[in-house]
Structures are given as structure tokens and as C-alpha cells.
Image: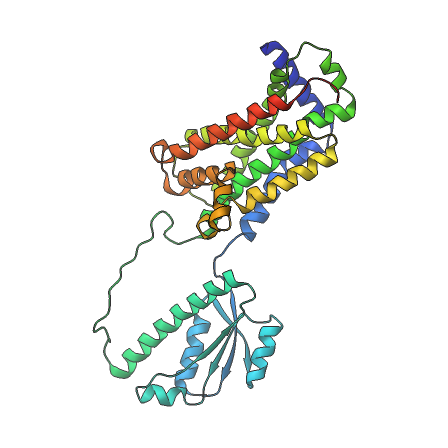
Amino acid sequence: MSWLRIRELVRKEFIQLFREKKNLPLLLVAPFIQMIVFGYVVTTDVRDIRVAVLDQAMTRESRMLMDVLNANNTFRITHIVFHPRDLDELLLERQVDITVQIPPDFSERIRQGDSAPLQILADGSMSNISSSRVAYTSTVLNRFNRSLIQEIYQRKMEYGEIDARIRTWYNPNLDSQNFFIPGIVAFLIMLISLLFTSLAIIREKEAGTIEQLIVTPVKPSELIIGKTIPYIIIAIGQMFMVITFAVFWFAVPLKGSLLLLFMAVCLFLLSSLGIGLFISTLSDTQQQAMMTTFFFIMPFFMLSGLIFPIANMPQMIQWFTYLNPLRYFLVIIRGIFIKGVGLEVLWPQFAALTIIGILVFAGAVHFFRKRLD
């Protein structure tokens, strides 16, 4: 293996890559735009719950309930209606997220010491968000219920209660951005590197320069390495850019070792770049390579655990996730960012990335043929 030939291949690849002026903003600006969009959009935090209220009681207790909802920064009473069918129409038209119907005997039942029914309807068309809204609404109503009982009976009703003192480690405020943004960093690194490397050899074929490489003494392994090194350098530069942006713009804490994260990125790139080159060696046109790349990206995204927990997937689907390098890298990057753990905890993920990377890269070298089809 000649490192001189590899060096010249790397230099040629950089010249060829930056000769097209559109590639530079795509490599430098696109990750920031995607980071901003995904960072603000991908969240499960309950921030603004639009509420419609039908107050059939018109009493002090019903007004107290409305004040509690209004005083909470998460809830916003947008509609006060006077007929039950208005609540249904508002939910149907998606003008509100939750409706509250206070019955006429609401206060009377409370003063008598009975349970007062309260009808709450939630828009369940988006089940993941609706469950969070319903849970948060229940928490606020339980707090209001305790304060109301204390006001009526002038004492706390704590007999037989379980005093659960809960602490949340690693992410005390349960900010979803701290969970999603490290995953978005991993996905962006894979997306850019996979797209560009899948076109690396195809460009040579379509430009007619593959014939020139064939008649040279360049070996298949040298050509693959020479095609890979530029994108490794670019991907590592993008990694530092998006991580810096995530830490200083989104205030995501980086508690672990930056050196360990760099090692993990290198192993992850071995897999993602190997897959890209594998696609490039088997494809005949850029269109075919792009379509094949997007065919891989969606399963990688869906089966990584970035959005949907792997434990909730069917058992057969869970087996397929073991072939996904993004699955292991997500565990590593979240562990380093949020928990600050080291290699003593993450070594199984590092080992899996190493095995997958070597197999995929070796497959790309094996299937490459230094000849015209």
C-alpha cells in the first residue's frame, strides 16, 4: 500500500469536491440550519395547552379552577363557551387541545364532601403529545384538589398517604432537548457523510475519469481509503461545529470526555462511510445511489431509538436494530453528553461499532472492481 498514492487521491478528491461552489455552503451551512430546525422542532415538552371551558356552575369554586388553569404558564384558556356541542366543534377544528366541562352541581357536591365530576376531553389525534397533556392536566387538578380540601376542612388530609420523594438524575428538569439534540447531532453526522460518500465513485464513473484510475497502479483498497479520508476530515469538522452549537446555543450539557466522543465519532464514521462507499461501488448512476442512500437512511432513523424506544418495538424488529450503527452511537453520545460515563460503561457499544465498521468497510473494498462493467 502506497501512502503517496493515497495522499494524491485525497488531494484530488478535495479539489474535485470544492470545485463545485454549491458544495461548500452545503457542507458548512446546511448542518447549522438542520440543527436549528431539528433542535426546536423535535421536542416532547408540554409548553402551550389551549383550553376551552364550559362553566355550568358559575360559582366561586369553578372560578377558582379556571384561575388555577390560567395562572399556570402551560395552560391557556382560549375559549369560554356556553354549550357542550361548542366544545366538540373546537376539538374537531383543532382550535383547542383540551376542553373542561364543569357541571352545575360542581360546588354543591364539593361542599357536601362528595366527589365532584369534571369532564375533560383531549384531542387524541396525536397520541404521544395527548398523553403528556392529559398527565400534566391531572397533576394540576390533583394539586388544586388538595388545596381545596385543605381550605374546606382547615387541615391537610395526609392520613395513609405514601410520601414519594422523587429525584431525576442526569436531566433534573426533564428537558427533552437534552435527550434529542445529542441524537440529532449523531443523525446529522451520518446523513451528510452517507450522502457524499455514496456519490464518491459514481462521480468518477459519470465523469469518465474512472478509466484513468483503472490504468494507474492504484489498488482498490488505496482508492477506497483515498476516497474516504476527505469525508472523514469533513465529518469530524462538522461534528465539532454542531457539538459546539449544541452546547452554546441550546445549552445542552457535555459532561463526559470530548476525546472519548471523538473516538466514538471515528468508529461511527467507519461504519457510515463504509456503507456510503458500499452503495457507491454497487450503483451505476448518481440517481440510483441517491435512491439507495435514502432507502438506508429511513430504516437507520426509525430503528435507532432516536424518537421511538427500541424496547417498544416488536421482538423481530428489535433484532434488526442490532445491525444499525446509529443505535450504538446514540447510546454513546447520550451517555457522554448527559451522564458523563466513560469506556468502562460504553465498551459494548464501542465494540459493536468496531465490528460493524470493519465488516462494512471490508465489504466495500471487496465489491469494488478496478475495471469497467
Image quarter in which the C terminus is found? top right
Vertical arrangement, residue 2 with respect to residue 326, above or below: above
Q: Specify the farthest residue to the front.
A: 316
Tell me which colouring the rendered structure shows.
Answer: rainbow
Residue 262: tell me if it is visible. no
Q: Quadrant of residue 85?
A: bottom right
Q: Position of residue 326 (x, y in %)?
A: 51, 38
Residue 222 in picture, x, y percent from top left: 61, 16
Q: Nearer the viewer, residue 69 or 98?
A: 98
Q: Is residue 137 visible?
A: yes
Where's residue 371, x and y in %?
Answer: 72, 18
Position of the N terminus by quadrant: top right
- Compare residues 242 and 305 and report the one nearer the observer: 305
Q: Residue at x 57, y 39 (%)?
A: 188
For this rendering, which residue is in front, 107 or 138?
138
| Position above or below: 65 against 255 | below
| Residue at position x 33%, y 32% in the image | 344
* Quarter residue 242 falls in: top right
**Image coords of residue 195 (percent x, y):** 64, 35
